[in-house]
């Protein structure tokens, strides 16, 4: 890719969300001349929130490798390598795709931990309790309650304001994804989310965290960063924390600052890496 070309951007949503959650960033990046691709996870695809809630069966039993493989097929069909950005579990998938060498730069926005990162703050554990408390539901697609959405996504809002966002955005869980993510934290070698932290030819990676995020507190982002930096790899891994922000980084008031930071970083780092 010439450093004068605008790289396409692939945005990967997280658990309980659909591509709709990226609407803010996607339109902003398109306005700056980038092609933006926002695929849904298998089973979500381009379905509406209401349709998924009405029939979540297509979400059942799908795991992280299947989701990552689907994104790889989409990315390999593009005419050039993209910038890849992922939110939450989408940030885990972003790191898995980085390990496959699929992008020119990667941004994990409040990314969950990859294999071997055992930092699990209490608020993070509470986030997963509704799913993890029922091991017999591993292949299910549990709805996200309004109460739990308020804790995970809307903790800067009143309950009524949070409930309005739930109505607009929230869908059922891929239960298997949560079980795999937690299990991988304690199995660095064989976990589904295994990545080679020491990989030398990985394109630049940025980890963004939010100061009052209940799902992925900064402690997790810093622990992920440490895995990469302690590996001895010369590949670039940068870190940025935004105080006063929640897990809803892509749509919380002031999201423009974060979107612009992520894109400016990705463009400059990818250009430098090919210069």
Image (spheres, rainbow, N blue to C red):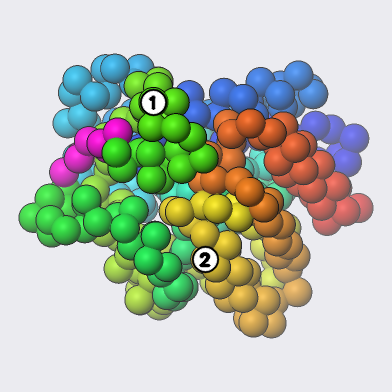
**Position of residue 70 in the picture relative to residue 51 (left or right):** right
Looking at the image, residue 185 lies above or below residue 274: below
In the displayed structure, does residue 274 sit left or right of residue 239? right
Read off the magenta span: 140-146
Return the residue nearer the eye: 128 or 29.
Answer: 128
Across and down, in percent, residue 247 comes to 51, 45
Residue 168 sits above or below residue 226 on the image: above
* Residue to which mark 2 is pinned: 220
Q: Secondary structure at mark 2?
A: helix
Q: Does residue 170 show up magenta in the picture?
A: no
Residue 258 in view, yes or no: yes
Q: Which residue is mark 1?
A: 160
Q: Residue at x 52, y 52 (%)?
A: 213
Q: Quadrant of residue 161?
A: top left
At 38% from the left and 39% from the top, the residue drawn is 150
Secondary structure type for disc 1: helix
Give the prevailing secondary structure in the magenta stretch: loop
Which numbered disc covers residue 138? none
Question: Where in the figure is residue 82, as x and y percent of width and height?
Answer: 67, 39
- From the viewer's perspective, is 255 left or right of 183? right
Asked whether the beta carbons under mark 1 and mark 2 sit within 8 Å of each other, the answer is no
């Amino acid at each position: 890719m010439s450093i004068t070309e605008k790289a396409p951007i692939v945005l990967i949503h997280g658990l309980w969300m659909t591509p709709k959650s990226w609407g803010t960033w996607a339109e902003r990046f398109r306005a700056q001349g980038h092609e933006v691709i926002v695929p849904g996870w298998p089973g979500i695809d381009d379905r509406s929130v209401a349709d998924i809630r009405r029939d979540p069966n297509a979400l059942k039993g799908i795991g992280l490798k299947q989701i990552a493989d689907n994104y790889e097929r989409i990315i390999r069909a593009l005419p050039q390598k993209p910038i890849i950005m992922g939110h939450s579990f989408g940030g885990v998938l972003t790191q898995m795709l980085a390990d496959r060498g699929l992008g020119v730069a990667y941004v994990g926005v409040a990314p969950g931990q990859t294999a071997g990162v055992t930092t699990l703050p209490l608020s993070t554990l509470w986030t997963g309790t509704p799913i993890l408390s029922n091991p017999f539901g591993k292949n299910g697609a549990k709805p996200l309650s309004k109460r739990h959405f308020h804790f995970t996504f809307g903790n800067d809002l009143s309950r009524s304001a949070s409930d309005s966002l739930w109505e607009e955005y929230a869908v059922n869980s891929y239960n298997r994804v949560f079980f795999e993510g937690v299990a991988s934290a304690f199995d660095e070698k064989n976990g589904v989310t295994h990545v080679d932290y020491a990989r030398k030819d990985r394109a630049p990676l940025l980890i963004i965290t939010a100061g009052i995020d209940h799902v992925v507190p900064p402690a997790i982002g810093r622990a992920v960063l440490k895995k990469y930096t302690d590996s001895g790899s010369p590949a670039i891994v940068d870190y940025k924390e935004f105080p006063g922000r929640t897990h809803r980084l892509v749509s919380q008031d002031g999201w423009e600052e974060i979107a612009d930071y992520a894109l400016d970083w990705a463009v400059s780092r990818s250009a430098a890496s090919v210069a």
